[in-house]
Image: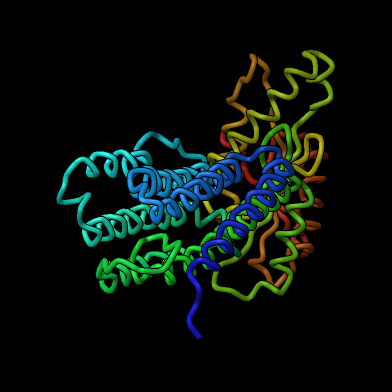
Amino acid sequence: MALDVATLFICELYVLLFLIVITAFAWSGAQYDKVLGFNCISLIVSVIAVWLSSLRNEGLLFWSVAVGNICVLLAYGLLLSAFRAFRGARCGYDWTLGMVLWGVLCLFPWFWNSMHNRILVSCLMCIIYTAAMIRELHRARAMLPVTFWPARLLLWIHLLFSVVRALLDGGIPSPLYGAIGGSTFSVYVILESILIVIGMSFTLMAMVNERTQIKYKQASLLDPLTGVWNRRALFEKADQLANPVSTAREITVMLFDLDHFKSINDRFGHYHGDQVLIDFCHKVVTELPADSFFARLGGEEFAAIVLCDEKVGMETAERIRQTIEASRPQQVHYSVSIGVASSSYGPLLVDSLIAAADDALYQAKAAGRNQIKVYRPDEQRLQTLPVAG
């Protein structure tokens, strides 16, 4: 059964109008996210381009061939801007080059009078724009653990279709009414454009939704004052390491308590107290290995999970203690007591290590503060790390 081009043409208009409504509501619901805004404008421009293409049979080639294709390339440029906005990049002005180039080429007879040449240039520009979108998507892959591959697959399908069209569309004028490309390949162009515009619109909405969900989840796991992980995040990390420690790398847990922190608030005010907390977190994150997990448990209490043995953990804790003792945020002197527990003595659970480090921390505070106590599951149980003097 042969597909009627005029019917497909009308279907494409209705699909685009429906998607504009859906995207406009999604844009509003997403607090006017730029990604959905660019996509919505791109769909509006696409509707204008599709309508202008129908004027070909009325003999209005300037509007259908020149202005219509300029609108198509403008829609591509807006879609590229949506992908750039997704990863927070500047949109720039290079996305307008396609429409400008098309307008300039229309001034040359070899281009204006040859449908084959126009199709080749159109396919080339589609390939370039789609490749640029794939590149932008690849840069944002860390933000899309779920929708990255569906979006990538959709863009690659569109790119390959443009390659196939460039090879197979000979630019033979179509006698059928409403052919967008004006060639016998029009029916495939319309079908593919309907499918790609539906897929891309819903994929962009899914991408924005996934990014928002990740953003809210990350925010729920971060301490708003210091920017480090919070107590909930720490115990989620502990759950990930809930099975007995049997890997080649050992685990060391450190618990920190800022000494006499209440007196800092009482003497200097809460603003200076907050600056002390922020300074402490900055210093600790700088000293910890890159694969460590550091969190604020609440108030002036903090914890770190470090993938190292006891010896390295003790050395790291001592560096932190010395760094904190020498720090003077807002001219406020402060110190820290640290409890350390390691899996060096057996396959302890992370929860057990946290409890052991808490026991060691209690002993460090009881022994005079500004020192490190290391948990040992032997008769002595606790060892004080000598303080460099």
**Horizontal side of residue 295 vs 36, given as left or right:** right
Residue 383, how many percent across, how many down?
Answer: 70, 52
Residue 233 or 173: which is nearer the viewer? 173
Residue 298 or 4: which is nearer the viewer? 4
Residue at 76% x, 46% y is 220
Numbered circles on residues, count: 0
Residue at 50% x, 77% y is 3
Q: Residue pushed farthest front?
A: 58
Residue 283, how many percent across, how many down?
Answer: 58, 34
- Is residue 338 in view? no
- Is residue 44 in view? yes
Residue at 31% x, 60% y is 123
Residue 243, how many percent across, how many down?
Answer: 72, 74
Q: Residue pushed farthest left?
A: 110
Residue at 53% x, 49% y is 47
Which of the 4 image quarters holds residue 114? bottom left
**Horizontal side of residue 293 vs 233, given as left or right:** left
Residue 10, how many percent across, how many down?
Answer: 57, 61
Residue 202 or 183: which is nearer the viewer? 183
Identify the image's colour scheme: rainbow, by chain, secondary structure or one colour.
rainbow
Quadrant the C terminus occupies: top right
Q: Residue pushed farthest bottom?
A: 1
Which of the 4 image quarters holds residue 34? top right
